[in-house]
Amino acid sequence: MIKNAGILALVVCLLLVLLSPGLVQARSKLAILDSSAQAEFPFKLNFNLSAKSGVNITDIRLYYVVDQASSAQVTSEVYIDFEPDTTVDVTWTWDMRKTGGLPPGSNVDYWWVVEDADGEKVEADQARIQFDDDRYYWYKLNEGNVTIYWHRGTRSFARELMAAAQQALTRLTEDTGAYLEKPVKLYIYANAQDLREAMIYPQEWTGGVAFTRHGVIAIGIASGTLDWGKRAVAHELAHLVNHQMTFNPYGDLPRWLDEGLAMYAEGPLKLEFEYFLDEAITEESLIPVRSLSSPFSAYAGQSYLSYAQSYSLVEFLIDNYGQEKMLQLLNTFKRGIDYDTALEKVYGFDMDGLDALWRDYIAEQYQPLTVVTTAVRVTKIPGPVIAGLAVLATAFLLALGLAAERWAWRRGR
Ligand SMILES: [Zn+2]
């Protein structure tokens, strides 16, 4: 009997040991006391951790993931360099001057894994920090999937930009079937200088940036440049729509389609672009569609012409084949299909076929300026006046540092 009682006591003790985690961890008592992160926009993100244990903490790792569209989730792992101790306070700084920056409003998820000399391991809960530009107080205006943040100017200034954004989205949906699938954020800085200060190594000419993968646009719009700003909002918003509609790990959109849709979202083609298009038709110096599928020329005239032709190509496809086909084309590109095959599948012609048909279309629309006809593409303003206007407009835009997108915009990754 006594022997049985002894065995029973032993079994109870074993069970207690097995069932109680407190007893198992009695030696280590490894625990995370505090975990936090602070942004120093736009350069740094600081991650802090406090932990303690009954024995030395020997291994600390930080894991983080940037919330962005990607074909596979990329988790970064950081080995923290520290002196083993029973109590540790560590900070690790993500210095974006070395890695490239993040746009305002982007989210970073992070967590810690800590290990001590007993082999005890603790994983902290995942936390999220929003990388905000907290150097300013941001006002907020939301409609549908679009949220505008601005730090200077009245609410009606923001409402005008929102109206431009919504108008661009409506135009895209009606004519191409494309729409915003996910929410986007627009950060409106008070001017180009404020915007540049929000970026790491900005270009002198930077007037705006679209971070397509993050669903973020940052633009500097001064009060006197509202008309330019409305077009810029429409244009860059269209790039986000294009990206959301067609993102896939295998392929991208031909440049003429991406830029053409963005120009189309802005509204009718502006006079200075018309000028370059008409000049190229007269001089038979139009750029082949195949060349417009890769990044555009950096030369001003060629760049203007590339944007103008892209607009015209998109207009040609929409006018002649309709909304449904354009949506089919976007859906085909979403499957990562190459440019020629995608066009062939949807329209029955490849890039060279498109080139030939489009040249006929534009030649039919275009008449030399000296010939008076109702089908005149450009107004009946004499050539030299148009040229003068275009030169003036170009000079003005260049002076503002806001010329064609080649100079004014840098596409985010
Ligand atoms: Zn663009």
Image (cartoon, rainbow, N blue to C red):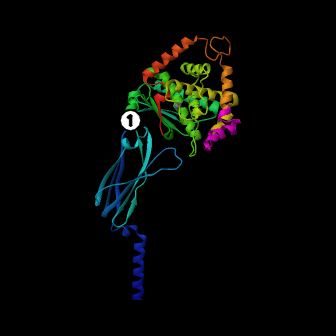
Q: Residue at x 67, y 21 (%)?
A: 363
Residue 208, horizontal then vertical, whole percent = 45, 30
Residue at mark 1? 201
Residue 55, horizontal then vertical, whole percent = 30, 65
Query: Mark 1 belongs to which amino acid?
Result: Tyr
Residue 87, horizontal then vertical, whole percent = 29, 59
Picture layout, residue 118 above or below residue 68: below
Picture layout, residue 23 above or below residue 373: below
* Image side of residue 116 versus residue 394, left or right: left
* Image side of residue 24 versus residue 179, left or right: left
For residue 343: magenta? yes
Residue 215, horizontal then vertical, whole percent = 50, 38
Pointer 1 residue Cβ closer than 8 Å to ligand 1: no
The answer to whether residue 167 of the structure is visible from this angle is no
Determine crowd level at label 1: few under 14, some 14-19, many 20+ residues with C-alpha closer than 10 A.
few
Compare residues 26 and 310 and report the one nearer the observer.
310
The residue segment tinted magenta is 331-353
Picture layout, residue 325 above or below residue 362: below
Q: Which image quadrant for residue 129?
A: top left
Residue lying farthest right?
348
Q: Residue at x 41, y 84 (%)?
A: 7
